[in-house]
Amino acid sequence: MESKPESGIAGALLPRNLGVRVGMLIAATILVAGGFLLYVLFARGVFEQTQRVILIADNAEGVRVGMDLTFSGFPIGTVRRITLRDDGKVRISVRVPVTEAKWLRQSSVFVLDVPLVGSAKLRAYSSNLKDPPLEHRAERTVLRGDANAEIPRMIATLRQVLENVDQITDTGSSLQESLKSARAVTERMAGKYGVLGGVLGGDDNARKVIASIDRANALLASLNGVALKMDTVLSKADQRVLGPGGVVDETQKAVAQANAILGEVRASLKRVDGILADAQAVAGNAKAATTDLAALRAEVEASLRKVASLIDEINRKWPFERDTKLKLP
C-alpha cells in the first residue's frame, strides 16, 4: 500500500520525453565521432589518390613506417610498408599523392641519409623535371649515406696516418737524417765564408773558389791592360797611316806626283809621235829630226827615272811593304 505513492512520485519527477532526448544525444555523439573519424582519415590522405613507389635498400636501419619522403625539404610521400625480400634486400613501399608525383621523374635519385645525430631522412632528387614522369609501382634503388658506416674507415685511415707520422719522426728516419743534414749545412753557413762555405761543403772549398775568382779577376785586369795598350797602338797606327801627314796622305801625294810625271811622259810621247810624223813627211831634214829625237829620248828617260824613284818612295813609305833584297854580309 505504501509503495504505490513512491512510484507515482518518481514518475511525476521524470520527464515524459527523456528517452527521446537520450537517443538524440547518443545519435549526435555517434555523428560527431564519425565526422571526426572521417576528418582524420581525410587529413591522413586516405581518400586521396596516390601513386606507389617501391624503393630497394640493402639495410632498413633508420627506416620506419610513417617516415616522410622529402623533395627539396618538403614532404611529398609517406612510407607505408617495409618488408624483407627473399634475396635479403629491403623493400620499402612509399605512397605519393598524385598531386605531388610531378616531382618524381624516371631520372630521379633516392637517398637514405643516416646522420650521426638525429633520425634518418629519405630524400628524392630530380635533376631534370622535363624527363618522363615516374610510373606507378616503379622500383628504384636507394643510395645510402650512412655517416656511422664511415667511422670505422676514418679510424683505420687515421691509424695509418698516425703510423706514418710515427715512422717519419722515429730515430733514424729520413726526416731525422734530413734534419741532421740541414743542421750541418746551417753550421757550415755560420762559418767564415757564410753561405758559400755551406753550399760548397766547407771553408777549404770556399777558399779555393774565392782564390780562383781572384785569379780570374787578375787575368781580366791584365787583359784590360793589354786591351788598353792595343787601343793605344791601334790609335797610333791609325794616326800614322790614316792621319794627316801619314802613310796614306803621303801615298796620295806620291800618286798625284806620279800622275803629273805620267802626264809629262804622255806629252813627251805625243811630241815623239809628232816628230816621227814630221820625219816621215820631211825626209830631207833627217839630221835635225835625229837631234830632236835624241833630246826627246833623254827627256823621256828622265821622266821614267822620276817615276821609278817615286814608286820606290811609295814602297818605302808603305807600312806593309817587305824588303825583297838580299843583303850579303
Image (cartoon, rainbow, N blue to C red):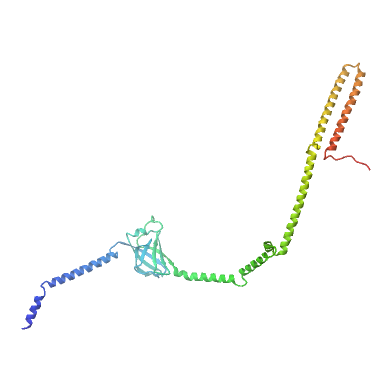
Residue at 79% of width from left, 42% of height from top? Answer: 236
Q: Position of residue 21 (x, y in %)?
A: 14, 71
How far across and how far down the image is residue 169, in percent? 59, 71
Q: Give the number of marks.
A: 0
Q: Residue at x 17, y 70 (%)?
A: 25
Along the line of sight, the residue nearer the viewer: 125 or 84 = 125
User: Residue farthest to the bottom?
Assistant: 1
> Which quadrant holds the N terminus?
bottom left
Which residue is pictured at 85% across the width and 22% down the height? 271
Q: With 211 as the anchor, is 129 left or right in this view?
A: left
Q: Nearer the viewer, residue 255 or 96?
A: 255
Image location of residue 296, percent across then percent down: 89, 24
Q: Residue 33 at what x, y percent from top left?
A: 23, 69
Q: Locate residue 116 relative to residue 225 in the image: left or right.
A: left
Of residues 43 and 85, which is closer to you in this image? 43
Kindly give the residue lying farthest to the right in the view shown. 329
Q: Report the side of 46 relative to 269 (left or right).
A: left
Question: If the image is split into quadrants, where does the C terminus sit?
Answer: top right
User: In this view of the protein, which residue sits in the foreground, 223 or 302?
Assistant: 223
Tell me where residue 137 sits by quadrant. bottom left
